[in-house]
Image (spheres, rainbow, N blue to C red):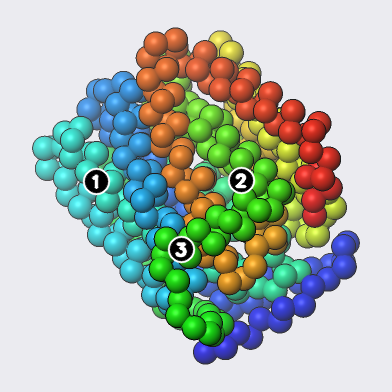
Amino acid sequence: MTSTVPKDSLPDGAKVPSPLKEPGFRRLWLNSIGYFIVANAQRFVFGLWVLDELGRGEREQGFVIFALGMPALFLVLQAGAWADRLNRKHIVIVTQLGAAVVMTGAALLASSGRATLSWVFVVALLAGATAAIGQPVRSALIPALVNQSQLFSAIALNALAMTASMILGPLLAKLIDDQFGIDGAFWFQAILMFSGLLFIFGMTVPEHEKIDGEQPRVVKATFEALQHVVGDQSLRILFGLLVLSSITINPAIMITLQAYVKEFPGRDSGDAAPVFAVMGLGIAISSVVVMRKGNMKHKGAVFQRAMMVGSTAAFLMGRTTSYLQLVPLALLMGLAGGFFINMNQGLIQSNTPKELMGRVMGLYTLAMAGLMPIGAMVLGYAASKIGIGNTISGVAVVSFTVVVLTYISKAELRKLA
């Protein structure tokens, strides 16, 4: 099949047609709503399973979340290479079906009453493996389904699906857990995964361009993408700041914060759900701004400023003295996070050749998702020694310092569009 997506571009400031007018992207986006709800509910539900159901602490929580992300360290680069040569639609179907089966198994295990920390670790590994293979392919599909002028709007719409899931995922999981128990929360995820496949079955995906000669092996193919990233100074810095965020701010807020909420009087880890929902609202607001503006100028500067604001909000979260103080800070974090997510991914994709897109998105997923569980495990250990609040504030200081130095010294990144 051939692409029906026009590959034209528009001048800065021109009105960008909605990516939702492209049938393939529309189907992917509708599927992504449920997919991201599961992704965000998953970390939260595993946290409930460890912290509340098994009665363990933040160190064990970090251990399980590490298991959830560990497969990304070994599989995303392979998946990125597959995305550049195999049928991307088939990969998405198989991985989502696999995720649905794993969630079904988790529900049965939870209902049996025989779950131990070791079993939870195994389930997290299997769930992480399906995500590690599927996520780079999903990211690589976006520029294949829209034209260049629609790319930032498409990424913003994808971020809206993700942020809707940040609002709905933990809240729905908490409500279902309260009514039906932890096994009900996993059945909820399995049903969403199975039903989401209906959108993908009818999706038309452009074929890969023909490549003359023998295709390189995965290691060599991935090395080509790494060479491209390292050889481009702007991409190198974008990836560097993404890695920094993935081992500091992201695990501190998305994972360690759940254990932090449990420390406030009268609260349990499930009370982190409204905080995540407010954060998701903030990301949704800033994603709408990006979507409406389309080709805004100086995206590199916007990205770095957002990272500074997010680091500041994280520092203040670690200094809070009451649960209610977390709410406005979560909104601020979300507003900054929306610009961070959209600008970082959009700048990386707009500066990557189509033939390298899958492999570069494999590297992106490795940096974004594969490293966060490592950060979570390290932060969980640090929190057990110096306190959760001190740990969150400490990594925020590191993040803020690095991005400020980068902003001052790298003028070319500030001007990147």
Q: Amino acid at mark 3?
A: Lys
**Which residue shows up at 74% across the image and 53% down it?**
290
Residue 239 tag number: 2
Q: Looking at the image, is 322 positioned above or below residue 114?
A: above
Q: Residue at coordinates 24% horizontally, 39% vertically from top-left?
A: 121
* Image position, residue 284 (x, y; %): 64, 47
Q: Tag 2: residue type?
A: Phe
Q: CA distance from mark 3 to mark 2?
A: 20 Å
Q: Which residue is mark 1?
A: 123
Which residue, as the protein is rendered here, is positioned at the far bottom? 1
Q: Is residue 379 left or right of residue 120?
A: right
The answer to whether one can see residue 355 in this image is yes
Above or below for 185 versus 331:
below
Q: Which residue is mark 3?
A: 220
Tell me where residue 29 appears, x and y as whole percent.
55, 65
The nearer-to-camera label among 3 and 1 is 3
For mark 2, give the secondary structure. Answer: helix
- Nearest the eye: 256 or 178: 256
Asked if residue 26 is positioned above or below residue 276 in the image, the reply reads: below
Of marks 3 and 2, which one's residue comes earlier in the chain?
3
